[in-house]
Amino acid sequence: MIKLKVKRILNKFLAFFDLEITRIKEPSHYSLKIAEIFYSKYGHGKSFSSGRSIDENESQIPWFTYPAIEYLKQLDLKNKLMLEWGGTGSSSAFFAKRVKGLYSIEHNEEWYKEVLSQEIPNHNLFLADSNYITIADDFNKLFDIICIDGIKRNACVKKSLSIMNKGGLIILDNSDRSPELGSFLRKEGFLQVDFHGFGPINEYTWTTSLFFDRTIELSPISIQPVIPVGGGF
């Protein structure tokens, strides 16, 4: 019975990779636990099958790596003003509940209408085309957090420096695809922290990087570190 349960859960996990277990010689509590944490507790099973960036409770989460999401979840961001360049939707719903105010810039009109229809509280969504970079000046704001997860990333990174408050944070998803951007920000004095690993939807790993101004002040919501997903005593 235990063998069948292990086999069934592992095959759900391995199905993401077109693999299958046909025989298990001995019950493996170790393998069963890993599959349960990834497939169920992180919610990757629901996320992968639905194609949505959601957790185990079907709440929307950023399409970042799980380690980056867990780190951000433990921070008190209620006094932070945030700007999103691309990546709107699930991340917007996630951050709008946590920050003082959220401004988002989207270039895809169809997706803009989809996100707008969600009527996310505390969220200011703007459609941009040729003004994708310069529209940030129209807000007449300095931001504490800037997330870059869309098009024209080089220009977004450089523009961020002039619209960011001292002590700010830049979030760059898929940073492993653009190491030159990390190099640029490090030369500008930012401290780079990379979060590698799996995340929602995808069957592969990638990197979400956070770039901290060296004068940044961040406080935890409660304890830090929190007990991780699948952890405990």
Image (cartoon, rainbow, N blue to C red):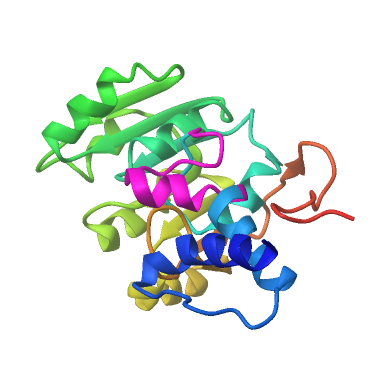
Of 31 and 202, nearer the camera is 31
- Locate residue 112, reporting x and y percent: 20, 30
Q: From the viewer's perspective, is 128 left or right of 228?
A: left
- Locate residue 6, reporting x and y percent: 62, 65
Answer with the quarter of the image where residue 111 lies.
Answer: top left
Of 96 and 70, nearer the camera is 70
Answer with the quarter of the image where residue 29 lies.
Answer: bottom right
Span of residues in magenta: 41-59
State which quarter of the image contains the N terminus: bottom right
State which quarter of the image contains the C terminus: bottom right
Q: Is residue 146 above or below residue 5?
A: above
Q: From the viewer's perspective, is 98 left or right of 118?
A: right
Task: Spot the residue most to the bottom.
Answer: 25
- Locate residue 105, reporting x and y percent: 28, 36
Residue shown at 38% from the left, 41% from the top: 84
Residue shown at 28% from the left, 63% from the top: 154
Q: From the viewer's perspective, is 151 left or right of 218?
A: left
